[in-house]
Amino acid sequence: MADALMIGILSAACAFVALYVRACTQISDS
Amino acid sequence: MTWQGGLQIATFAVLLTAAVRPLGAYIAGVVEGRLKWPQALLAFERGLYRLAGVDPTEEQGWTQYAVALVCFHFFGIVLLYGLQRVQGLLPLNPQQMGAVTSDLALNTAVSFATNTSWQSYAGETTLSYLSQMAGLTVQSFLSAATGIAVALALVRGFARRTSKTIGNFWVDLTRITLYVLLPICIVASLFLVVQGVPQTLGGYVDATTLEGAHQVLARGPVASQEAIKLLSGDGGGFFNANSAHPYENPNALTGLVEMLLIFLLGAPLTYTFGRMVGDQRQGWALYAAMAVMFLAGLAIVYWNEARPNPALAGLPVDQAAGPAQAGGNMEGKEVRFGVGQSALFANLSTASSDGAVNSMHDSFMPLSGLVLMGNMMLDEVIVGGPGSGLFGMLLFVIVTVFVAGLMIGRTPEYLGNKIGANEVKMAMLALLVPPLFILGMPAIATVLPAGLAGLNNTGPHGFSEILYAYTSGAATNGSAFAGLNANSLFYNLTLAAAMFAGRFLVIVPVLCIAGLLVAKGRVPPAMGTLPTHGPLFVAVLIGTVVIVGGLTFFPALALGPIVEHFAMAKGVLYASP
């Protein structure tokens, strides 16, 4: 359970980075 | 201050500066693929690409580069996390260490994959040899190579004309690891073994002391981890006491070599930068800016530590320098190294992203603690970690030419690249992410019981302990102020968040800038072009770094080390909680 929670937190953080990359792309294309 | 201390600092400065040119040129040769290697080594490199399904001739745009980097480290974190969780079932565990708790394992995995190496654990009582070697040491190599790769991608952005690509992440990672990190580490590890650092898979040793007491001596594969610990800017020691432990740092000579290793990649990268952009003076200008800031910080720390501690005045304590002792504020310092080497090591450790220690920073005088925190708060641009120092300084260069351009009414330019609004936005984004965590997290920790539970000091020093921890995490430094018990669910998770953000949310905009610059054509210098290789630009650059850092962090520092300094002068002391 604890392991699933930790991997979930890490996955959420990486998903945030993916959104962050996308946001930077949009800014750079503007 | 003693002449021995001055001699150590001068020796270090001369040796480091002498290494900048040859090593910088070598790194440039490696990443540009100009050096001739033995066929066997090239075949091994090609084999790695085939194994990974990578075409080394195919370059990537900045988004591909960033996604490859983040995915690679995501899997690295998961692997290191899993290794710690099942280490009790795996071999190379003579002390039969059990599974690391889930929150500590996540903190440690993020810590080493982000080149931070914040350690909420004691290595010799927590991790198996396999976890130390296949987990931490491997991540130290890979995180350092990633930092250098990102810096060189940004340099390509400045150097190339009208391109769409900034390099290939997998090729950069492989070449830097194979041809830069590994050779230096092999030589350094062998040197450390010769000097007495253990390198063994044998278990801990039961010893009987001269007084007849029983003592367990921890040992293990220390030398191989020690070399990359310092070179990579990771700083995570095999032992809890880090480079204050005699098995990690046996004598003054190993101390000097370890200090050189901390800056041995960061400093030469300025030369690599000059070589790749075709103007060596630009690289030396960055090196000069770093050197001036470093020496200023070192002078403050050494001066503060060489003086007697006023809180001990009137007590029967001899703090004067003499043949039998280094004198000054010796609390928390190794008597073998004294004040001079401790001040130098502490400055190197915090100015770089290394975070290794040979003395306890918590015991430094308040103004010294301010400098050590300041080194990290300035985005670690004073040489900094491998690669991260260079790209951090180039972010400040972009801000500097932007400010200077506003002052003289011209479009900002750097190395023939027009710096537009998007580049400045990305630079500011990268520079503002660490302060968000450095200032925001302590604000939360100081009002929550879970945050206050870890403190061993009250008053401004207690606040400094919390501020230092998040500064160290968000700046991916990893050194600890000590005095804060950070192995709790709250600190393990919040520090992991600070480290993750301080690494990846900075790297992404840096790569974006590289992508923006590389697509632009270069403009020839004109009459109004601001020279960026002279003393005036170096002074403006230093001013920008210090002012941005000062404006951002002065209020927080005022609540911690500054008020503690004045309280100490008044004789005000704070009780333990």
Image: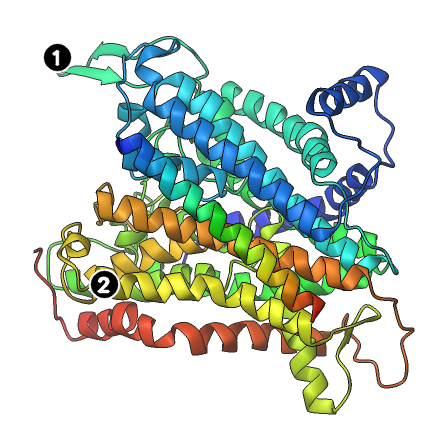
Q: Chain of mark 2?
A: B
Kind of residue at disc 1: Gly
- In this picture, residue B451 sits left or right of residue B389: left
Q: Chain of mark 1?
A: B
- Indicate the position of residue B400 as horizontal and vertical percent values: 65, 76
| B288 and B47: which is toward the camera | B47
- In this picture, residue B470 sits left or right of residue B21: left
Q: Which SS class for mark 1? A: loop
CA gap between label 2 and label 1 equals 43 Å
Marker disc for residue B463: 2
Q: Which of disc 1 and disc 2 is earlier in sequence?
A: 1
Q: Which residue is mark 1?
A: B212
| Residue at image location 80% in from the left, 63% down from the top | B281
| Residue at image location 37% in from the left, 75% down from the top | B554
| Residue at image location 63% in from the left, 48% down from the top | B66
- Indicate the position of residue B388 as horizontal and vertical percent values: 59, 52
Q: Dividing the image into 4 quarters, which one contains the C terminus of chain B?
A: bottom left
Kind of residue at disc 2: Phe
Whether residue B200 is visible: yes
- In this picture, residue B359 sits left or right of residue B167: left
Query: How many numbered dots are placed on residues in this image?
Result: 2
State which quadrant residue B334 falls in: top left
The residue carrying pointer 2 sits among few (fewer than 14), some (14 to 19) or many (20 or more) residues within 10 Å by Cα, namely many
State which quadrant residue B119 falls in: top left
Q: Which SS class for mark 2? A: helix
